[in-house]
Image (tube, helix red, strand yellow):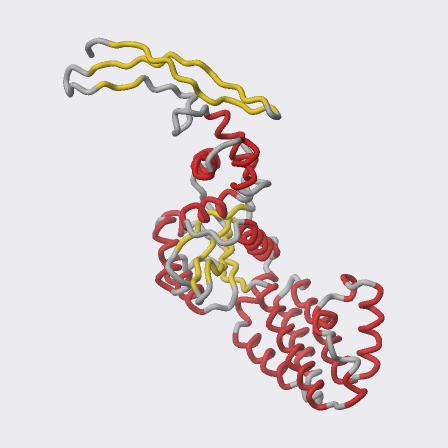
Amino acid sequence: MGWYDRKVRRVRDLSCGDTRIYLELEVRRVECRDCGKVKREQLDFLADNPLYTKRFAYYVGRRCRQATIKDVAKELALDWHTVKALEMQYMQAQLARAGTPVPRAIGIDEISIRKGHTYRIVVSDLIRGRPIWFGGEDRSEASMSAFYAWLGARKSSRLRLAVMDMWKPFRLATQAHAPQAAILFDKFHIMRHLGEALDTIRKREYARLSGRDRRYIKGQKYTLLSRRENLTLDGKRALKALLAANKRLNTAYVLKESFGQLWSYEREGWARRFFENWRASLKWQRLEPYEKFAVMIDRHWDGIAAYCRPENKVSLGFVEGLNNKIRVIQRRAYGLHNEDYLRLKVLTCMLPAL
């Protein structure tokens, strides 16, 4: 190294209300005798953008967890792009602190990132309660295989449980790369199929009736699909009137409510007996959508009965809760066009603040 000098630099450090705090730094510059270039002294407490400290970058990142980039930029008198860059540095630091995942139980789901059936796959660690992978080009088997390639053969061999919906490409990719893992179909996706069957029955009953008989059914879609304990007082009254007026919908609603008991059994034999009894109760009821649903459950039984084993008792609501959280992130941002930024938002949404 040859000569060096000092350059005074003004660096943004903190914001306290309307007060902005800056640091005056003397940064040494050194001429390299080998390459002839002038190099600046590296200071660990500076952010990637050398006009700001890491402490300030982390403050911006924490604010962006509760507010939009536009609001934070206005609050701190910064450029929109500067706030976004500081937040991305903050999220990258979060991931670095969280470390490399070694999951034992994973949840697999897809999210839509824009209109036109454009999907990305989100994989979560169900035991630690955090998303660990966001990627793929669609929801195909090849995109799902990309996750296992990222995870590696050694870590894939340690997986013991994979929770997913009944989408065939997810199942085939898991069986190919982690054959030792038990596959469990997500309760919430199955109950959604049952809810769709109930709504089909509601529509057919509305089309079958006429005149004043329709007034009990009209506008009651979500009253039927909701659990009774989640309804308001007016909703419970409307449900009671509807079920009293229409026998077929009453039967369909009772069957829908009772089906959730399937996940409470601790032995597969008991669960199978319950399902066979539930299926037998469909006889003579003229509930064709329910009969199709029962055929689907029978076809995917192994992935449902896996929950009866004690080692597979995990929280099945995490995957659906994460999906809802991602939709909130997308709505708050009015659409995210930078996919790398969306990936960081998804992977850090469950991590603790720095």
In percent of the image, x 37 and y 12: which residue is there?
26
Query: Picture quarter containing residue 197?
Result: bottom right
Q: Residue at x 57, y 63 (%)?
A: 186
Q: Is residue 287 left or right of residue 45?
A: right
**Residue 323 shows in this picture:** yes
Q: Is residue 316 left or right of residue 238?
A: left
Quarter the N terminus occupies: top left
Q: Position of residue 86 (x, y in %)?
A: 45, 34
User: Closest to the observer: 92 or 157?
Assistant: 92
Point out residue 90 in the picture as x, y percentages from the top left corner.
47, 34
- Give percent across and percent down for residue 270: 66, 69
Q: Is residue 117 above or below residue 178?
A: below
Q: Quadrant of residue 119?
A: bottom left
Describe residue 302's horizontal placement relative to residue 180 as left or right. Answer: right
- The mark tally for this picture is 0
Residue 111 at x, y percent in the picture: 49, 59
Q: Residue at x 41, y 14 (%)?
A: 25
